Image (spheres, helix red, strand yellow):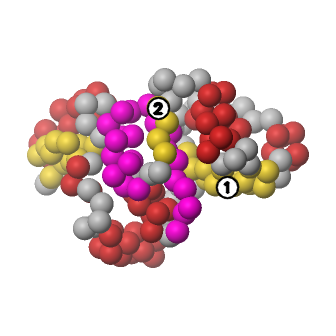
Amino acid sequence: LNLCALACERGAESVLVVDRSAARLELAKKFGAHHVLDASELAHESLVGTVRDLTTGRGADVAFEVCGAKEAIPVGLDALRIGGRYLITMVTPGNAVELDGNTLTRRCLTLHGIHNYTGEHLGEALRFLESVAEHYPYDEIVGRTFALDDIEEAVVVASSGQYVRVGVTP
């Protein structure tokens, strides 16, 4: 959701979000997404076709994978334009992804894995949040907050998908 706000604030012409959660898709609109697609209702071909339709057949300039599901990778790849860039944050161990090298080469695609950040990046992120916090509904992201002593319950509730995020306080 923060990525939607960041893309909009940095001048993205069009921001499209694909997700399986209706709650996250609704929030994505509030965070600036111009288009949202429910991956639980659309097959791979329909998702890619819709992206192509929204980009007059060209495809997306940039795609981000931020969900950790290996099933998302092929959709993002197929939705990219020739010369497109794909930034992947999937950090779930054991999530091997099959890639067709021919697709990468012939379409001149760039894949970039993103995992760690430095203190400088964290500072940039905090400054960004400070500058836009009043423009986006960050308060709607966390559905329930737990005391640190209730961390086990927090993990169970977070895993249930009932809330977009849960919070834990010391």
The verdict on residue 25 being magenta is yes
Q: Which mark is residue 38?
A: 2
Q: Is residue 94 above or below residue 124?
A: above
Q: Is residue 139 above or below residue 131?
A: above
**On the rendered structure, is 109 left or right of 152?**
right
Q: Residues within 10 Å of mark 2 (few under 14, many from 20)?
A: some
Q: Is residue 148 above or below residue 62?
A: above
The verdict on residue 10 being magenta is no
Label 1 secondary element:
strand
Instruction: Place residue 104 in its image quadrant.
Output: top right
Quarter of the image for the C terminus: give it: bottom left
Residue occupied by mark 1? 61
The residue shown at (64%, 54%) is: 62
Q: Which mark is residue 141?
A: none
Q: Decide if residue 91 is in sight here.
A: no
**On the rendered structure, is 72 left or right of 1?**
right
The numbered mark, 2 or 1, whose residue comes first in the sequence reads: 2
Q: Decide if residue 71 is in sight here.
A: yes
Instruction: Place residue 75 in its image quadrant.
Output: top right
x%, y% of residue 92?
Answer: 51, 38
Find the magenta span and give its range. 11-32
For the residue pair 66 and 52, the one nearer the viewer reads as 52
Instruction: Place residue 131 in its image quadrant.
Output: bottom left
Q: Name which residue type carries label 1.
A: Asp
x%, y% of residue 143?
Answer: 20, 42
Label 2 secondary element:
strand
Q: CA distance from mark 2 to mark 1?
A: 20 Å
For the residue pair 86 and 156, the one nearer the viewer reads as 86
x%, y% of residue 147?
Answer: 11, 46
For the residue pair 151 and 20, the one nearer the viewer reads as 20
